[in-house]
């Protein structure tokens, strides 16, 4: 990749993680944000309060993502009850949107369970 390629890959990974965080933050709390709500190369969504309110766990969300054709993100690291979403530089916007749409649909299902 060389220096320029590595720099570009890092920029795209950080941009992608922030895109996911921005699209999901109205539905899931996002941990470890800096100024302006920005994250680094990963977006950590917090399901702990959702679990307390509805009984739906991080495991349930991970299994549901499989139904949508996604391998579950890292679960409960670095914080128990969270999903760490780390889009790579190879994920295009259509795939990010497909993932986000799945997470939005799952949140609607969680809300139905809670009601």
Image (cartoon, rainbow, N blue to C red):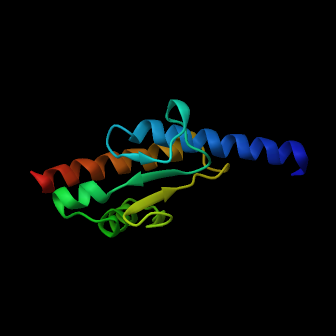
Q: In the image, is 12 to the left or to the right of 26?
A: right
Point out the residue furthest to the right here: 2
Would you place residue 71 above or below residue 53 in this image? below
Residue 81: image quadrant is bottom left
Give residue 71's position: percent from left, percent from top. Answer: 48, 66
Q: In the image, is 31 to the left or to the right of 109?
A: right
Residue 14: image quadrant is top right
Give residue 115's position: percent from left, percent from top. Answer: 9, 51
Give residue 100's position: percent from left, percent from top. Answer: 42, 45
Give residue 73's position: percent from left, percent from top. Answer: 48, 62
Tell me what residue is drawn at x 39 percent, y 40 percent: 25
Tell me what residue is drawn at x 36 percent, y 46 percent: 29
How many marks can you see?
0
Tell me what residue is drawn at x 46 percent, y 36 percent: 22
Point out the residue furthest to the top here: 36
Tell me what residue is drawn at x 45 percent, y 65 percent: 72
């Amino acid at each position: 990749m060389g220096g320029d390629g590595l720099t570009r890959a890092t920029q795209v990974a950080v941009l992608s993680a922030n895109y996911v965080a921005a699209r999901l933050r109205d539905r899931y709390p996002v941990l470890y944000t800096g100024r302006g709500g920005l994250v680094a190369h990963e977006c950590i969504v917090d399901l702990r309060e959702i679990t307390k309110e509805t009984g739906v766990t991080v495991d349930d969300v991970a299994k549901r993502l499989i139904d949508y054709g996604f391998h579950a993100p890292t679960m409960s690291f670095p914080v128990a009850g969270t999903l760490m979403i780390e889009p790579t530089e190879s994920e295009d916007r259509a795939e990010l949107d497909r993932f986000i749409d799945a997470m939005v649909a799952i949140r609607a299902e969680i809300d139905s369970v809670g009601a």
